Image (cartoon, rainbow, N blue to C red):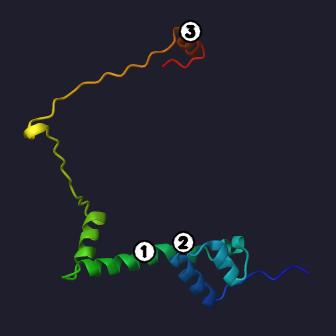
Amino acid sequence: MPAKPFTPTDEQRRLVKAMAGYGVPHDDIALVVKCSPPTLRKRFRHELDVATIEANARVAQTLYQQATTPGNIAATIFWLKARAGWREKHAVEVTGKDDAPVAQQIVVVRRFVDPQERAAVMLEGKAE
């Protein structure tokens, strides 16, 4: 006699959506819902797809409210760095003795290759 197909209940759909939104791995959600991971992905596809999107939207809404509330400087700074592209700029000035400019030095680095090794590499079609 064939096994009865898994039919999700509304409560299971709510539970899967909540757990997926919290970031619970699919294998763990399947254990709680009492189905296999492939069945979870097949029968709860929509819940798994939208859960993270909706959770991120709720957190973003909360962050936005915090960032626009006077007095929450940390949330405001985070929002501006993460969403508005603001960056802290750190300038470092290097000076020599008695604040004199540092003399620039040019360093040339050359790689010397054994001529026989170079010929072997070129024969293999790996010219540098």
- Which of 111 and 55 lies nearest the eye of the viewer? 111
x and y, in percent, of residue 9 in the image: 65, 88
Q: Nearer the viewer, mark 3 or mark 1?
A: 3
Which residue is painted at 24% across and 58% down in the image? 87
Tag of residue 49: 2
Tell me the quarter of the image containing the N terminus: bottom right
Which residue is painted at 8% across and 39% down in the image? 98
Q: Does residue 88 sit above or below 37 in this rendering?
A: above
User: CA separation, marks 3 and 1?
Assistant: 60 Å
Tag of residue 116: 3
User: CA separation, marks 3 and 2?
Assistant: 59 Å
Q: Secondary structure at mark 3?
A: helix
Q: Secondary structure at mark 1?
A: helix
* Residue assigned mark 1: 56
Q: Does residue 115 sit above or below 26 in this rendering?
A: above
Are the two marked residues, 1 and 2, in contact with CB atoms closer than 8 angstroms? no
User: CA separation, marks 1 and 2?
Assistant: 12 Å
Mark 2, other Cα within 10 Å: few <14 / some 14–19 / many ≥20 = some
* Amino acid type, label 1: Asn
Which residue is painted at 61% across and 90% down in the image? 11
Along the polypeptide, which appears first: circle 1 or circle 2?
A: 2
* Amino acid type, label 3: Gln
Mark 1, other Cα within 10 Å: few <14 / some 14–19 / many ≥20 = few
